[in-house]
Image: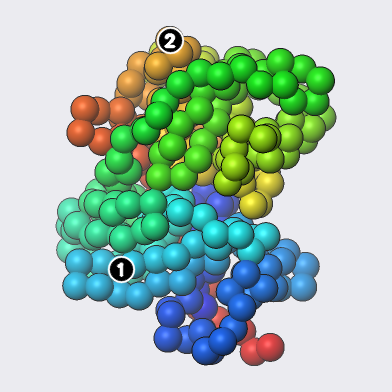
Amino acid sequence: MKFVKVHAYGNDFLYIRNRDVASGVALDALARELCERHTGIGADGLILYEPTKDGASMRLLNADGSRSEVSGNGVRGLAALLLRDDDRPDVEITIHSEGGIKELVRTGREGSRQTFRAAMGLPVDLRQVTVTAGGEAVQLAVMNFGNPQCVSLGPLPDQARFARLGPLLEHHAIFPARSNVEFAHVEAPDIVRILIWERGVGPTTSSGTGSCAALIAAAAFGGAARNATVIAPGGRQRVEWLDDSVYLTGWAEVLIDGDWVR
């Protein structure tokens, strides 16, 4: 089975065309096997895709085999895969995800890294709530951004608190489909620093939708500007919250073409 591995800021995905998956294969089990870091190829998620006239359609499974609607870094990685042999400037590409249609423009290329500005849509049902997790009251900004997101604004937690609260918030009763979790600190109006606990994965070095959600929460409730740099452990992405969409700018890099022989 042929696969391609792509990453964006260390947030890595395996891409397989639909036709290359044998009929009857349990996709959740396949995702767990391929994404396992020690006995598989290793990745944060598995993306099954099919080229279309304007780009591609995709389905995403997290490393634990659960379904996810969309990933900002995963969308960008698929665009980088599809355009790696295309040298046209400012080329546009459309990715059809279960979390909505995403329009991307490639704005630059440096070696194997391609930079895209992606229209990621607008938040739905943005609000603040207070929940109890791990014996403490935690104020959250929650929203749907193609996928469920919750953001805790304030000083970033230490490693122990992050590891404790991340899974508790992901699985909190107010999120029937679980939630992605970001801890976000507004360092300056145009700089937001985050830590990410990804639904179905755990700690990740970067998240595209998580970066967007963090900026939305920080701008709505934390005094940040609506155009800011969001810094995750893996690096910086630019997020612009405009009237028509939230735009995410960052890079992705194709790493490996391979064959899974099991």
Q: Name which residue lies at 36% across and 16% down.
A: 225
Q: Name which residue lies at 77% across and 73% down.
A: 39
* Apparent side of residue 31 relative to residue 99 in the rendered image (left or right): right
Residue 205 visible in the snapshot? no
Q: Position of residue 5 (x, y in %)?
A: 52, 68
Q: Residue under circle 2?
A: 223
The picture quadrant where one finds residue 143 is: top left
Q: Is residue 158 above or below residue 62?
A: above
The picture quadrant where one finds residue 182 is: top right
Per the image, label 2 sits on a secondary structure element best described as loop
| Amino acid at the residue labelled 2 | Gly
Q: Is residue 144 above or below residue 35?
A: above
- Which part of the image, by quadrant, shows the N terminus? bottom right
Q: Position of residue 151 (x, y in %)?
A: 55, 27
- Which part of the image, by quadrant, shows the C terminus? bottom right
Q: How many marks?
A: 2
* Apparent side of residue 53 relative to residue 177 in the rendered image (left or right): left
Tell me if mark 1 has few (under 14), some (14-19) or many (20+) residues whose alpha carbon lies within 10 angstroms of its own. Answer: some
* Apparent side of residue 24 relative to residue 38 in the rendered image (left or right): left
Q: Is residue 5 above or below residue 236?
A: below
The tag earlier along the polypeptide, 1 or 2, is 1
| Nearer the observer, 251 or 63 | 63
Q: Position of residue 84 (x, y in %)?
A: 33, 68
Per the image, label 1 sits on a secondary structure element best described as strand
Q: Residue under circle 1?
A: 56
| Nearer the observer, 159 or 114 | 159
| Amino acid at the residue labelled 1 | Ala
Q: Name which residue lies at 68% across and 35% down.
A: 172
Instruction: Calculate the distance from the C-alpha at mark 1 to the C-alpha at mark 2.
Output: 37 Å
| Nearer the observer, 194 or 221 | 221
Residue 129 visible in the snapshot? yes
Q: Position of residue 259 (x, y in %)?
A: 57, 85
